C-alpha cells in the first residue's frame, strides 16, 4: 500500500498541471445539519465544490461506485466485486465513451464533468490515506461516465438477464418479485389546494447506505443554477430536487426496456450465427478479472461476445444477446443537468426530449401551477408478432429494433382537471383521476407498461380522493401515512385469506390471528399488530419462494407462517406481544431508534437481521423533500434517514435520525442571504 500511495502522489500532481479551477473562487457553506451549499460564479466551479464537499463527507462510497463502473471493484472487495467488474466490461461502456463522448456531450457539460473530476482528484491528492485503489486515480471523464452506464444498465434490469443467462435460468418470463422498496411522488395544483399553492412530494425509497443512497446538496452559480436536492455518490449534479421555478422527483418504472435474443448458430462453423439466411461472425471478447484464491490474486479471463443485437453470452442452451437503450446512450447525466437548469415546463420538457434517461417515472410541479407526470424511458419500437416479454428470435432483422418512442408518445398527464398526479411504482394508467388518466388501449402492448396497483398506490388514491381540496398539513399527512389498505394489495402476492381465517379452528395461533385481524394496519413503532405482522411477513418468505404464480397464499401456508412467527417471538422476546419498535430499529453507529414502516406502506421500510432477534431497516424511506410554490417563492423542507456525513466521528453522522423517526423535517432555503446568515462554517475547497 505504501508503494501505491507513493505512485499516487507522483501521478496526481502531473494531472494538476492542467487544472482549470481556482478553489478560492468557490465557497462551501455548511448549515447546522452539515448540508453543503456550494456557491461559485460558474457551474464548473460549483461542480468542483460539490466533488470536494461530498468527498469530505463520503469519499469511500464515491470510490466504490467508480470502482464498480471501471472493473476495479474486486481489487477492493475481492471476489464479491467480480460480478460488477464483469458487467462493466460486458456492456461495452469504454467503447461507447470512445465513440460518442466527443460528439454527443455538449461543450458546456464537458466542463462540468472535468471540474468534478478535478475536485475528486485534488481531494485524493491531499488525502491519499483515504484512497481505496490507487489505480482508480486520476478520475477522468471516461471513468465517471462508465459508472453512470453501469448504473443505468442495472436500472434497466440488464444485470438480471445477464445472471439468468450465465446461470442457465432462461425461463423467459420474470416472475413477480417480492419488492423490498418502492418510491412515491405526488403533486397538487391550485385546483386541489385550499391556499392556491402548488405542492410536490419528493419521496424516493432507496438503500439508506451505499452507492445508490442519497446525498443532499444545494448548488448555486451565477450561470443560472440554484437547486437543492439529492444525488448519488459520484454524480456531478442533482438527480431529484427543486430550483426557484420548478421541482421534480423520480420513481422506478417497469416498462419493457430490455430484450434478449436467441441466436441461431451455424451447425458446423464455430461462432457464426444466422440472420435472414446470412451468416455473421460473433466477435469474441474477454473480460479481464482478478480472482482471489486463498487470498492470492489471480488474473483470469471470461469470454463474452458481440453480435449485431448487442453484447452476447453463451450458456448450456446456446448464445443469447442483450439489447437495451442504456448501452447505446451516454447523455443521461447531461439530461439531468439540463433538468437542473430548466426554468419552466417548456424548458424542462425540452430536456426530456433528449431521450437520454433509460427509464424512471417523473412527478413534476412548478411556480406557474403546472403539474405533470410521465412514465419516461427509452422504450424500443418493436416488430409485431413476437412475445417481447420472452426471449425473441435473433435470426431475423425484423426483431432488431433501432428506434425508440418519442417522449410525446409515452403515458403522461399534464394539468389534469382533478388537480393531482401521483405514482407509487404502479400503473401509469392510474396516475390521476379516471377522466385524466392515460388510456392503456392507446399504447402498444409491446411497450410493456405496468397494469397493476399496489398497497401504496391504493392507499394514496384513497387518501387523495377524500378531499375536494386540501391544505398543506393534509398534504403532509398523506406523505407520512403508514397504513395498509383493506384488503391488502401487494402486487407480488395475495395474503388476504388471513382476514378470513377462523381463529377457533387454529387454537395454537389463535391469538396471533386475532391480533392481526383487529390491527388497524398502521405501521407505528408502538403497535403490537405491526410488530406481529413484521415478523409474520418475514416468515412468509420461505413459502413465497416456492409458491407458484399467482402467489396466492392458501390458509395452510398462512398457518404454517403464523406457527413460525410464534416460535420466533417466544424464542427472542419471550412474549407474543411485541411492538414494531421493539423488533425494528433504525441504527447508525451506536444510536438505535425504534422505527416506523413496513414493506409497501407509503412510508415503506425493508429490513435485515440485526441482533437478538431484532432487525434494522436498510432501505425504504430515505431522502424526503417537500416543496411548495407560493406567491412568496418556493418553500422547501427536507430530511434524510441518518445525516450528511458517513464518518462516525462527525456531528452529522446521525443527527437527522430523530427528525426522521418523528416525521419531522428541517427548513431549507435557496436564498443566498438566508443560507449565509444561518451558516455554521464557510470555507473554500483546496
Image: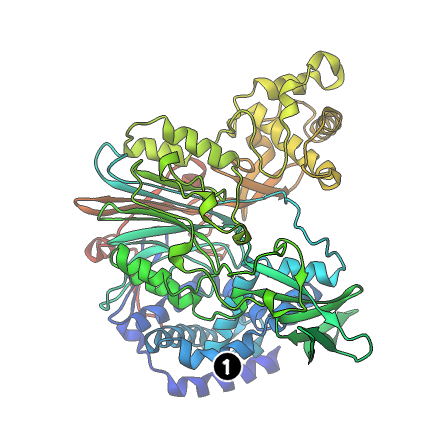
Residue at the spot x=27%, y=47% of the render? 370
Q: Is residue 293 above or below residue 583?
A: below
Q: Quadrant of the N terminus?
A: bottom right
Q: Is residue 171 above or below residue 271?
A: above
Where is residue 181 drawn, in percent x and y? 54, 44
Q: Is residue 16 above or below residue 311?
A: below
Q: Residue furthest right?
A: 268
Residue at the spot x=66%, y=20% of the render? 512
Where is residue 495 drawn, in percent x and y? 64, 29
Which residue is label 1 attached to? 98
Count of marks, rendered view: 1
Q: Is residue 97 above or below residue 575?
A: below
Say whether residue 42 is left or right of residue 231: left
- Who is closer to the viewer here, 84 or 649? 84
- Who is closer to the viewer here, 39 or 357? 357
Where is residue 584 drawn, in percent x and y? 58, 36
Q: Work out whether residue 465 can be spotted.
A: yes
- Who is closer to the viewer here, 609 or 328? 328
Say whether residue 79 is left or right of residue 381: right
Q: Residue furthest left?
A: 631
Say whether residue 316 is left or right of residue 511: right
Say whether residue 162 is left or right of residue 520: right
Where is residue 112 drawn, in percent x and y? 36, 73
- Who is closer to the viewer here, 572 or 104? 104
Residue at the spot x=35%, y=69% of the render? 47
- Report which quarter residue 415 is drawn in: top left
Which type of secondary structure does the marked residue at label 1 adopt? helix
Q: Quadrant of the C terminus?
A: bottom left
Residue at the spot x=34%, y=34% of the render? 475
Q: Work out whether residue 216 can be spotted.
A: no
Amino acid at each position: 500500500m505504501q508503494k501505491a500511495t507513493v505512485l499516487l502522489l507522483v501521478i496526481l500532481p502531473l494531472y494538476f498541471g492542467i487544472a482549470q479551477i481556482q478553489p478560492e473562487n468557490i465557497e462551501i457553506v455548511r448549515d447546522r445539519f452539515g448540508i453543503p451549499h456550494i456557491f461559485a460564479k460558474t457551474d464548473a466551479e460549483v461542480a468542483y465544490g460539490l466533488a470536494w464537499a461530498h468527498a469530505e463527507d463520503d469519499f469511500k462510497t464515491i470510490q466504490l461506485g467508480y470502482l464498480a463502473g471501471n472493473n476495479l471493484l474486486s481489487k477492493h472487495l475481492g471476489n464479491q466485486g467480480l460480478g460488477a467488474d464483469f458487467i462493466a466490461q460486458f456492456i461495452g461502456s469504454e467503447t461507447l465513451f470512445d465513440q460518442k463522448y466527443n460528439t454527443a456531450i455538449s461543450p458546456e457539460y464537458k466542463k462540468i464533468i472535468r471540474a468534478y473530476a478535478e475536485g475528486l482528484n485534488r481531494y485524493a491528492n491531499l488525502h491519499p490515506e483515504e484512497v481505496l485503489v490507487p489505480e482508480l486515480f486520476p478520475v477522468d471523464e471516461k471513468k465517471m461516465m462508465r459508472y453512470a452506464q453501469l448504473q443505468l444498465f442495472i436500472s434497466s434490469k440488464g444485470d438480471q438477464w445477464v445472471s439468468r443467462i450465465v446461470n442457465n435460468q432462461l425461463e423467459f418470463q420474470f416472475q413477480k418479485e417480492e419488492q423490498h422498496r418502492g418510491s412515491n411522488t405526488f403533486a397538487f395544483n391550485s385546483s386541489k389546494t385550499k391556499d392556491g399553492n402548488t405542492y410536490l412530494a419528493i419521496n424516493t425509497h432507496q438503500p439508506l447506505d451505499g452507492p445508490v443512497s442519497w446525498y443532499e446538496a444545494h448548488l448555486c452559480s451565477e450561470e443560472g443554477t440554484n437547486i437543492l436536492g439529492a444525488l448519488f455518490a459520484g454524480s456531478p449534479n442533482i438527480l431529484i430536487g427543486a430550483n426557484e421555478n420548478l421541482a421534480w422527483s423520480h420513481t422506478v418504472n417497469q416498462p419493457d426496456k430490455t430484450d434478449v435474443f436467441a441466436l441461431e448458430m451455424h451447425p458446423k462453423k464455430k461462432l457464426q450465427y444466422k440472420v435472414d439466411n446470412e451468416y455473421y461472425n460473433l466477435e469474441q471478447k474477454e473480460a479481464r478479472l482478478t480472482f482471489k484464491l486463498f487470498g492470492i490474486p489471480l488474473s483470469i479471463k471470461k469470454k463474452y461476445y458481440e453480435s449485431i443485437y448487442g453484447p452476447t453470452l453463451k450458456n448450456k442452451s446456446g448464445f443469447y444477446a442483450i439489447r437495451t437503450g442504456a448501452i447505446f446512450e451516454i447523455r443521461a447525466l447531461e439530461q439531468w443537468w439540463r433538468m437542473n437548469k430548466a426554468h419552466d415546463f417548456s424548458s424542462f420538457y425540452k430536456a426530456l426530449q433528449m431521450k437520454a434517461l433509460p427509464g424512471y417515472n417523473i412527478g413534476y410541479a412548478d411556480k406557474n401551477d403546472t403539474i405533470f407526470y410521465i412514465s419516461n424511458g427509452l422504450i424500443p419500437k418493436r416488430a409485431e408478432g413476437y412475445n417481447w416479454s420472452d426471449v425473441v428470435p435473433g435470426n431475423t432483422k425484423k426483431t432488431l429494433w433501432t428506434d425508440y418512442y418519442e417522449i410525446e408518445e409515452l403515458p403522461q398527464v399534464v394539468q389534469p382537471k382533478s388537480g393531482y398526479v401521483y405514482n407509487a411504482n404502479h400503473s401509469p394508467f392510474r396516475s390521476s383521476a379516471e377522466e385524466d388518466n392515460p388510456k392503456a388501449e392507446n399504447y402498444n402492448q409491446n411497450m410493456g407498461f405496468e397494469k397493476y396497483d399496489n398497497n401504496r398506490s391504493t392507499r394514496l388514491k384513497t387518501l387523495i380522493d377524500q378531499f375536494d381540496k386540501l391544505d398543506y398539513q393534509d398534504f403532509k399527512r398523506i406523505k407520512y401515512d403508514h397504513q395498509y389498505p383493506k384488503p391488502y394489495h401487494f402486487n407480488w402476492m395475495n395474503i388476504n385469506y388471513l382476514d378470513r381465517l377462523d381463529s377457533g379452528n387454529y387454537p395454537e395461533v389463535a391469538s396471533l390471528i386475532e391480533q392481526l385481524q383487529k390491527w388497524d394496519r398502521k405501521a407505528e413503532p408502538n403497535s403490537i399488530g405491526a410488530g406481529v405482522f413484521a415478523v409474520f411477513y418475514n416468515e412468509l418468505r420461505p413459502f413465497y419462494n416456492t409458491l407458484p404464480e399467482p402467489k396466492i397464499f392458501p390458509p395452510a401456508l398462512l398457518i404454517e407462517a403464523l406457527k413460525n412467527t410464534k416460535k420466533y417471538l417466544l424464542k427472542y422476546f419471550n412474549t407474543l406481544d411485541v411492538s414494531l419498535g421493539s423488533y425494528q430499529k433504525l441504527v447508525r453507529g451506536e444510536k438505535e431508534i425504534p422505527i416506523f414502516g413496513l414493506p409497501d406502506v407509503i412510508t415503506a421500510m425493508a429490513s435485515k437481521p440485526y441482533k437478538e432477534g431484532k432487525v434494522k431497516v436498510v432501505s425504504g424511506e430515505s431522502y424526503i423533500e417537500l416543496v411548495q410554490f407560493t406567491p412568496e417563492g418556493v418553500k422547501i423542507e427536507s430530511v434524510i434517514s441518518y445525516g450528511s456525513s458517513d464518518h462516525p466521528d462527525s456531528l452529522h453522522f446521525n443527527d437527522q435520525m430523530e427528525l426522521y423517526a418523528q416525521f419531522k423535517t428541517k427548513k431549507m432555503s435557496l436564498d443566498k442571504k438566508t443560507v449565509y446568515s444561518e451558516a455554521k462554517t464557510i470555507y473554500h475547497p483546496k
